[in-house]
Amino acid sequence: MVKKTGRPAYLQIADDLREQIRGGSLPPGAPLPSTAQLAAHYDVSLSVVKMAVGILRNEGLLIGQQGKGVFVRESNGREDAPARDLASEITELRTAVAELSQRLARVEARLSEQSGS
């Protein structure tokens, strides 16, 4: 399910899970599938899934319960919304900076090749 777009797989997975949470297919209190199940579903390694889940935990969308699993966080009302929105915005900005850095590196490499010819 992860596409080869140049965007890291863990960010694609985090986006997909975030969309499922916000769309209601993963409602508050619902358990997230296991890391192994998610890895099989997205055809990625366990570490990639763990990174995606970590992002959503940092955003406050997921919460881990020792020995029980990871669950969609119950909403406490509007007080969580600004923190989640800010965390989402920071994640998006980091992704954009990483993508721009990669593009800049490719442009610099091409310029270097052209000036070396």
Image: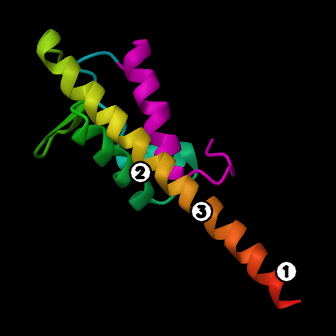
Residue 30 place in picture, x, y as percent:
28, 22
Q: Is residue 57 left or right of residue 96?
A: left
* Residue contact between numbered discs 3 and 2, judged by CB atoms under 8 Å: no
Q: Quadrant of residue 108?
A: bottom right
SS of the residue under disc 3 = helix
Residue 47 place in picture, x, y as percent:
39, 61
Which of the two labelled residues, at mark 3 and mark 2, occupies the earlier sequence position?
2
Residue 55 place in picture, x, y as percent:
32, 44
Which of the two labelled residues, at mark 3 and mark 1, occupies the earlier sequence position?
3
> Magenta segment range?
1-26
Q: In which quarter of the image is residue 68?
A: top left
Q: In this view, does 30 lie to the left or right of 110?
A: left
SS of the residue under disc 1 = helix
Kindly identify the residue that appears in the image at 44 percent across and 22 percent down: 20
Mark 2 surroundings: few (<14), some (14-19) or many (≥20) residues within 10 A: many
Mark 3 surroundings: few (<14), some (14-19) or many (≥20) residues within 10 A: few
Residue identified by numbered label 1: 114
Residue 66 place in picture, x, y as percent:
10, 45
Visible residue check, residue 39: no
Kindly identify the residue that appears in the image at 82 percent across and 90 percent down: 116
Which of the two labelled residues, at mark 1 and mark 2, occupies the earlier sequence position?
2
Indicate the quadrant containing the C terminus: top left, top right, bottom left or bottom right: bottom right
70 in relation to 97, above or below: above
Q: Which residue is most to the bottom? A: 116
Q: Which of 105 and 67 is in front in this view?
A: 105
Q: What residue type is labelled 2?
A: Val
- For the residues marked 3 and 2, what is the alpha-carbon distance in whole angstroms? 22 Å
Residue identified by numbered label 2: 49
